[in-house]
Amino acid sequence: VKKQSTQQVVKFSGLVAAVDSSGLSFEVSGNVETVHVDIGDRVKKGKVLAVLDPEPYKLEVDAINAELVKARGEVDKTRAQYERHKRIYEQGAGAESYLDVAEYNYKAAKSAVKYQMARLDLAKRNLRKTNLLSPYDGTNAWRSVNPNEEVAAGQKLLEIKASGEMETQMSVPETTIDRIQVGDAATISFPTQPGESTGGRISYIGSAAVEANAFPVKVTLTAPNAKIKPGMTAEAVLTLKQDNQAKGFLVPLQALLPTHEANRGYAFVYDPDSSTVVRTPVHAIGMDKKMAIVNEGLKEGDIIAVAGVSFLADGMEVKLMEK
């Protein structure tokens, strides 16, 4: 008889992934001029990964600069007109309506300058965005672009996986999700790397089920071996607490002789000193997978008969079967 475990060990399959991973795209559209990385290349933060043809955006900057010069000239012109109408009005020789129109034109000209300056800032930003930069140190894991291709803004072209922390991403069924929590320990093994394993802790539990009523769960790896790479298959072993499991000993149903009283019966416990069996009353509090949960009458380490109990009697001499 062994003490019933209050924990359950389960295993889930998943994939290794970098904790930080970004699908990269240009924020502006255009024709790709050059691509500087391929799949598997290591990159540094700030490295230029790809470049769009900048000419259309340079021309736009030049055009807005020209309009800004024109707008500033209009400010000088309308200011002079406003100041002249203001002097005439103050001398009592001009109409107030002329002064109001001149003041309006002057303010409108200044607003036009601000508008063109904002357009120029946006055009310069668009010109800078013709360079696609790496957001952090890492490895390029995906590429779907070549030079001379026309790409749209927001179209995914590359995927950078950051160096450093890695995690296992997996799905946990709804029947288990309430029995784990963020911070729980896990052991991660890798089928393609026999003998390699590492510890981990649950870092994320999804709040909503996705495919097949399973919840997304992430386990951050504590000290992965250098051989472990993003995209590898992983198996996470979790220890689930069974708080609702009744405490007692699990014994086969056929080991118990029934009585007329509910949940009570007899087991034949082996006495090693006399090589006999002792008919012992026991109390069961439930079932677990065709096993009775006995909470009274037995103790850990007892040896009980599990077959032929109807042929036994209290004090009968028996001989243990050889292992």
Image (spheres, rainbow, N blue to C red):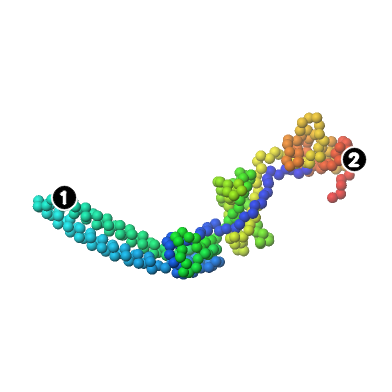
Instruction: Tell me, for residue 97, which label it has, or none.
Output: 1
Residue drawn 50% across the image and 68% down it: 146
The disc placed on residue 246 is none
- x and y percentages locating residue 96 in the rendered image: 14, 49
Say what amino acid the circle numbered 1 marks: Ser
Q: Quadrant of residue 259?
A: top right
- Give 117 or 162, whichever is nearer the viewer: 117
- Work out how far the residue at label 2 is from the one at label 1, CA to CA, in angstroms: 126 Å
* Vertical position of residue 42 compared to residue 259: above or below: below
Could you say where residue 198 lies in the image, as x and y percent from the top left? 63, 57
Provide the residue designation for mark 2: 317
Residue 248: percent from the left, percent from the top?
73, 39
All told, the count of numbered labels is 2
Residue positioned most to the front: 150
The local secondary structure at tag 2 comes to loop
Q: Crowding near pointer 1: few (<14 within 10 Å), some, many (20+)? A: few
Query: Is residue 8 shown above or below 70?
Result: above
Give the image location of residue 206, x and y in percent.
Answer: 56, 48
